[in-house]
Each structure stands twice: as structure tokens, then as C-alpha cells.
Image (tube, grey):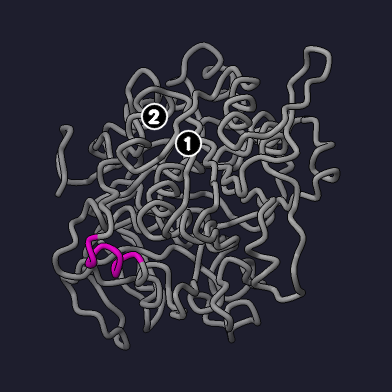
Amino acid sequence: MKGIVFEFKLRKLIIAKIAGFFRLKGYLSRFGPFRLKDLPDPPIRGDNWVVVRTEYCGICGSDTKQVFLHGNRDNPLIGLISFPQVLGHEVVGTIVRTGPFVNIRIGTRITLYPNISCKPRNLPPCKACQEGDYTLCRNFTHGNLSPGIHTGNSSDATGGFAELLPAHEWMVFPIPDGITWKQAIIADPFSVAFHSILKVLPSPGSICAVYGCGTLGLLTIQILKHVFEGLTVIAIARFPHQADMAKQFGADIILKHRPTQKIIEQIASYVNCDVYYINGKKPWLIEGVDFLFDTVASNETLEIGLRIVKAREKVSNNTNLDLISTPGAIVMTGVSTPKRFEWTPWYFKEIRIIGSNAFGDETFEGRREHAYKHYFKFLNEGLFDPSPIITHTFPLKKFKDALVTTAKQKKNKSIKVILTHKTNRQVDIK
């Protein structure tokens, strides 16, 4: 089969870094770490495992950051993954082979839950997995698989940047009738956004800001406006095509990402609060938005976020739910290279910065079940359609063009770019 392999070798990383300095495609040189190769078909890894033929695979922001070497080599997560890798964890496909104990039929359309925690590793569930918090699993380096958090960053659990991939039966969710490939492939990023909102459970009347209008930001806007009720959503967008999509998805107010001082002043004007100026430096607010969902998490967005989120409101009692729902919080789903920022408002306003990573079993309206089941239910109820965020589709052989299109968002007006294994030309999907 054909697959794109990422090899973590110093020589290849150096070559890519040097070549990438001159042009973006330099990172994708055949002498670099990321190449299209012929690979052996994946085996059935156990009695409860299947092989999936990839129909489409989304390119996640984490994929592009890795390919274009954005990040620090001392990132602690390197200790939880293994190489070489076939990336790609936003996968929809068809079951083509099964182990003897699998209850899903060959030919079934599925969407992949890429987490490789205790169950796929054939281990007794740790406490986090027992509670459905699979992303907090304690066993990502144990069991019968090489280290890895999810499909695509374990050398044994290869991903959707290849024609075939292995998966435990627990990791595949049949796509209900009436749901298109295009809708199903959004299940993973939708669930990431949904998980982040459930960290704070904004109540009717809350003012929420969403920083960044890429895939996660736009899905966050759509959920806030169509799943929850009575919320005002302020979108902070970098590019005009993102602003247009934010409006289509329901944002009430759309602000440009720069100049940053204007963001602060516009929010102050909307909430009718004082602005505190500091000798020509960036101002700040003590009042402000109730909740901020930061899908970028750069030093700039975190600094501005701390200036526009209101000071923590008093907790009326000690229940966990009350603490969760208390305004004065930033939920961080983005991942950027760490840099210095001015964080004094963090402690002064007692703002909570809450990390939000991936998803698992989620509780919403009294139902605790896997995030994909919530997503399919919302689609069947006609609450929204997220598929317009898919702007480009490329065949696997054109992966270099696909990745450059993803990275050059302004030029290409790209949001979600996906790969397919069907043809050698650009295609549309349904």
C-alpha cells in the first residue's frame, strides 16, 4: 500500500529545516523526514482488531505543525510516542478485514476514534479509562502496542495518511445511514470542540469569545450557537474567509485579530465596561467576556485573552458544577510553541486557564456517552451541518500540495483540507 511516513532522524530534520527556510515545500523534500512510500499492508493485530480502507483523512493542525517542524524538541509528549509514524487520525473508511471476535461486518462505513489507551493495548482499564476519560489514560507506553497517544503517533497504530490502517473494534464507530462522508469526517474535530465547551458549561446569557476561526474555532462557534441556548458569541478571526464562515456558523460579533488593542476596546464597548490604559501599552479590562475559547494558544492570544476575560465571579457554593460554570475562565484547545507573554492579569483577576485535550465519553443533558454518539444525534436532529468547513480535497499523491494549502490559509482560503485515496485529481466528496 501507499503511505506517507514521518521519520524522526536528526539528519532528515536538519535538511528539512534548512530547505524549509527557503520555501515551504522544502520541508517536504525527499531528503527530509516526511515521504510517500510503499508500505506493507497492516496486519490484524489481535482477535478484536480490524483493517480499515481509508476513504478520507482530515489534515489536523497537529499534523501540519509536525510536518513543518513547529515546536520544541524537548516537548514532553515525545516521551509518549514512537517512530516511524504514518500520520492521520481524522479518518473515515470501510472495514475490509476483521479478526475472529469482531462483531462489525466487512463493508461497514466507519469513523475512527483514534485513542489508543488501555482497551486497544489489551490492558485492564486504568481509573481514567474506567470513567471514560480516555485521553487521561496512564498506559500510553504500555501493553502490546508501541508508545503512542492516538492513531498516527504510534509506529504500530499507523494512520490515515495511508490506504489501509489497523484499529481495535472499540475504536471504530459505524456511520449511521443518512450521514455523509463529509459530515462523518468532522466527528473528531467536532468532538474536540464539544469537549472544550463542556469544561465550563456556559449558561444562557453568557458572553463567549472564540479566539481563532480555523476548524476548531468555527466548530466551537457552531456548537455554542446551535447546541446551547441564549449565548452571545464573539469571534476573533485572522482572515476574511474565516470571518465569513464564522458569520455563517452563527457568530454574533466578528472582530479582526489585529490590532490587538482594538479587540480589547471593542469588547469593552460591547459589555460597557472601563478600559485601563498603561502609558501607550496594551490596555486591559476587569470586566469583559465570561468565557474565552482559545483555539490558537499563542503567546499573543493568551495575553489578550487574559485582558478581555472578566475577573472571576464569586462562587455561591462549593459544588463542582457551580465552580465549572463560574465566569472568568479561558479554555485552551490550541497548541503553539511556548513564548513569553505578560500574564499578570491571570492571578490578579483569578482567571482559570483550563487545558482541554481531545475527547472521550462526554456528559450532556444527563446522557454520558461517547462524543461521537452525541455528534451523530445532533446531525440526525438537524441542529447544524459542519461540512462547509471542508474547503479542499486532494488525492494522497498530491499530499505536498494539500499540506501547503493547509499552511497558506490566506492565499488559498483554506480551512479543513482532507486527503483521499480515490483518484489522482482533486475531488469533491458527499
> Pointers 2 and 1 in contact (CB under 8 A)?
yes
Give the amino acid at mark 1.
Answer: Ala
Q: How far from the left and from the top, in percent, is residue 333? A: 57, 48
Q: How far from the left and from the top, in percent, is residue 55? A: 22, 53
Give the amino acid at mark 2.
Answer: Ala
Dominant secondary-structure state across the stretch colored magenta? helix
Residue in view at x 42 percent, y 59 percent: 229
Residue 378 in the magenta stretch? The answer is: yes
| Residue annotated with mark 1 | 235
Q: Secondary structure at mark 1?
A: strand
Residue in view at x 24 percent, y 44 percent: 420
Q: How far from the left and from the top, in percent, is residue 327? A: 66, 54
| Residue annotated with mark 2 | 243
- Say which quarter of the image contains residue 5: top left
Mark 2 or mark 1: name the one nearer the start of the chain: 1
**In the image, which residues are magenta?**
375-382
Residue in view at x 58 percent, y 55 percent: 82
Residue 50 in view of the camera: yes
Q: In terms of depth relative to the viewer, which is nearer, 254 or 420? A: 254
